[in-house]
Amino acid sequence: MSVENKAAPGAPYYTPAQEPPAGTALDPATAPTVFQPLKIRDLEIQNRFMVSPMCQYSADDGHLTDWHFSHLSQFAIRGTGLIIVEATSVLPNGRITPHMGHIFNP
């Protein structure tokens, strides 16, 4: 028996395609609501599992680190529909702690 590991389309490096994607209901017609897609304007989320922003106190001068990547990627790999990155501020003086991220670096 031969098993083919198809590559995910558009990935810059080899990563296996997930068919169906993680977090997708096997039978959408009978799946509980939490597994149903959610459409908000032009955004369609494949399920209703969501990770809210957390204060991880791990930013480096307001910038995301490898910690954020490894921490949040575990949710993405398992099929979470929407992941919102750590609490952020527009300017450094808007941070709630010195190690919180910000989205603009003047």
Image (cartoon, helix red, strand yellow):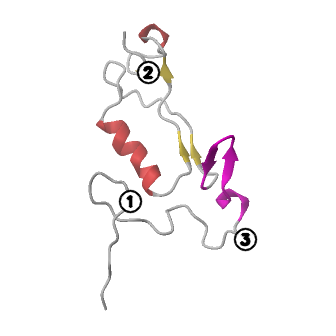
Q: Amino acid at mark 3?
A: Ala
Residue 33: x and y in percent read 72, 59
Secondary structure of the residue carrying numbered label 1: loop
- Label 1, label 3: how far apart the Cα atoms are: 27 Å
User: Going from the N terminus, do you reach mark 2 or mark 1 first?
Assistant: 1
Magenta span: 32-46
Quarter of the figure with residue 3: bottom left
Residue 89: x and y in percent read 49, 18
Tell me the residue that label 3 is attached to: 29
Quarter of the figure with residue 35: bottom right
Count residues near mark 2 (Cα–Cα under 10 Å), then give few for <14, some for 14-19, many for 20+.
some
Quadrant for the N terminus, please. bottom left
Tell me the residue that label 1 is attached to: 9
Mark sitting on residue 100:
none
Secondary structure of the residue carrying numbered label 3: loop
Left or right of residue 49: residue 83? left
User: Going from the N terminus, do you reach mark 1 or mark 3 first?
Assistant: 1
